[in-house]
Image (cartoon, rainbow, N blue to C red):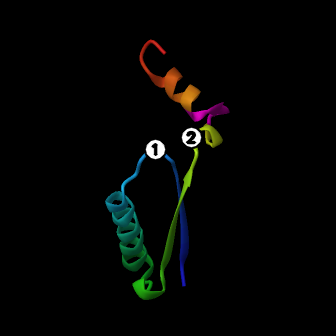
Amino acid sequence: MPYVNVKITREGATAEQKAEIIAGVTDLLVKVLDKDPATTFVVIDEVALESWGVGGLPTAEYRRRQRPGG
């Protein structure tokens, strides 16, 4: 009974996009590990952008530095 927790930043992912993530993760577990999709759980948590960091920086600052001229 797999349980997968996907965390994304809260930036407007649509219900359709989330459904695609859920289906894709489930399909991957079926193909790779032969798991039963009926007992595979996928949870998507949306995290506020200011609560997410990358490379020791808040995400917004990290992104600014990655832009050309940033």
Name which quarter of the figure residue 48 lies in: top right
For the image shown, how many numbered marks are present on the structure?
A: 2
Q: Secondary structure at mark 2?
A: helix
The dot on residue 49 is 2
| Residue at (51, 23) in percent of width and height | 64
Name which quarter of the figure residue 3 lies in: bottom right
Question: Label 1 amino acid?
Answer: Glu
Is residue 21 depicted above or below 34 in this figure? Answer: above
**Image location (x, y in percent) of residue 69:** 44, 12
Q: Which residues are magenta?
A: 54-59
Residue identifier under label 1: 11
Q: Earlier in the sequence, mark 2 or mark 1?
A: 1
Q: Is residue 34 left or right of residue 55?
A: left
User: Is residue 57 shown in magenta?
Assistant: yes
User: Is residue 33 shown in magenta?
Assistant: no
**Image location (x, y in percent) of residue 25:** 41, 68
Q: Quadrant of the N terminus?
A: bottom right
| Residue at (54, 79) in percent of width and height | 2
**Image location (x, y in percent) of residue 57:** 64, 31
How far apart marks 2 and 1 lie (CA) works out to 8 Å
Q: Secondary structure at mark 1?
A: loop
